[in-house]
Image (cartoon, rainbow, N blue to C red):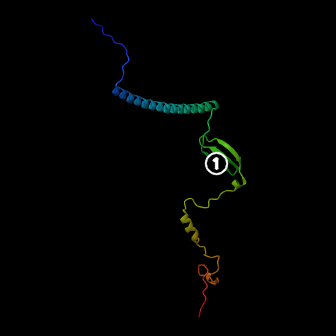
Amino acid sequence: MEEIIKEYLKCLLTEAEMKKEAEKMAYCFSQLSELEATLKSAKKRIESDIARVEAELSLSVEKYRSGFEMKNIDCRVDKDFQTNTVRVIRLDTFETIRERAMTADERQMEMDLQNKEETPEEEVETQSKPMEGAKATTVFPDREDLPDADVNGYMKERKEKTD
């Protein structure tokens, strides 16, 4: 009886098999390029994430070490005209953070010339009306007495009379 065994031997490829292997190689090169690009992109993203976390860690270490952090806090400026001082007060803790003497300009009190409830239109009406019981007078003499001026005080054009 004959015995049949398997041996690992060289076999020449046919034209069709060569073409199939060429297509397989092209596909593998394409996949390899794509995976390498993905790896580079992922590596950059992960390196960026690492840098971000390192920066956060550094800030946290500094805050912990120093026991404070700097922030923009709303503050109120109080002008005390009795003591001629200006104070800056934190609005979160109401702590006075700075106090100094008023400058000469700051010591000049501001006057509120407009009533808060009065609108600008009402203000104009109020200013143009004479007070009750007051006699209406003008600073200007009668406009008719002014030479070459009309009733409103505008200069009239001089007209040459031709007879």
Residue 73 point in image, percent of width and height: 60, 42
- Left or right: 9 in relation to 156: left
Depth check: 107 or 20 in front? 20
Residue 31 point in image, percent of width and height: 42, 30
Residue 3, placed above or below residue 108: above
Q: Quadrant of the N terminus?
A: top left
- Left or right: 34 in relation to 77: left
Residue 32 point in image, percent of width and height: 44, 29
Kindly identify the residue that appears in the image at 61 percent across and 83 percent down: 144
Find residue 137 and report its image quarter. Answer: bottom right
Residue 122 point in image, percent of width and height: 54, 65
Q: Quadrant of the C terminus?
A: bottom right
Q: Secondary structure at mark 1?
A: strand
- Left or right: 158 in relation to 104: left
Q: Can you identify the residue that label 1 sits on?
A: 77
Q: Residue furthest bottom?
A: 163
Depth check: 150 or 131 in front? 150
Q: Amino acid at mark 1?
A: Val
Depth check: 63 or 163 in front? 163
Kindly identify the residue that appears in the image at 41 percent across and 31 percent down: 26
